[in-house]
Amino acid sequence: MAESRHYFIGIQIPEQLAHQIKADIDKRSELSFQKWTAPIDYHVTLVFLGAIPEDRLNKISELLEQLSHEMSAFPLKLNEIGVFGQIERPRVFFAKPSESKPLMDVREKVKEAVLSANHPVEKRPFHPHMTIARKWNADHPYIEQAPLRKEPYSMEVSSIALFEIRLKETPRYHVIKQFTLHK
């Protein structure tokens, strides 16, 4: 049986910045997780699409292209650390971007584009994050982490991307189409 493809829309973390973040995380010997995200796969998901018919994916792509002309580049800062799941044994360890109006506005516009293409969007509240690792893997409990460094990592978000997930590859997340923010 053929494996169905899954997709999401997100913000790609620039490679140089991703490697700097990974180098800083590697200095923390107390972290023990089963699965680590490769720096080349660092991203902030805006909307997860999952499996989707090709015609609907094409419609979403068209809408994102139109939308990109209405959106401006904006700064994004990453520094805070967080977890999902039980605090003692988290299932996801992540870096959290500073919440900003431009980030939330872009997310809302992308969400509306997906909905207007008649594709469902997860109903849970949106918590922007960049997954670093999964599945706590130690006998001792996870200890809450300080920010990654004194000054946040900063980047300019000048595009959003449509990604295809390829679970058996590295990189795991492949940019299918990039949408430059033009305004």
Image: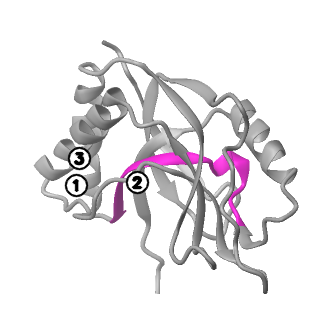
Q: Quadrant of residue 135?
A: bottom right
| SS assignment at label 2 | strand
| SS assignment at label 3 | helix
Callout 2 amino acid: Phe
Position of residue 74 in the picture relative to residue 144 (left or right): left
Q: Nearer the viewer, mark 2 or mark 3?
A: 3
Task: List x then y, in percent, for residue 45.
Answer: 44, 50
Please name the residue shown 69% across and 49% down the image: 146
Task: Single out the residue that lies furthest toward the top.
Answer: 183
Reading the chain from its start, which is encountered first: label 1 or label 3?
A: 1
Numbered circle sitting on residue 111: 3
Please name the residue shown 51% across and 75% down the image: 85
Q: Quadrant of residue 119?
A: bottom left
Numbered circle sitting on residue 8: 2
- Pointer 1 and pointer 3: residues touching (CB < 8 Å)? no
Q: What is the magenta segment's predominant secondary structure?
A: strand
| SS assignment at label 1 | helix
Distance, label 2 to label 3, CA atoms, is 11 Å
Which range is magenta? 36-50
Please name the residue shown 46% across and 22% down the image: 158
What residue sits right under mark 1 in the picture?
56
In the rendered image, which quarter contains the C terminus?
top left
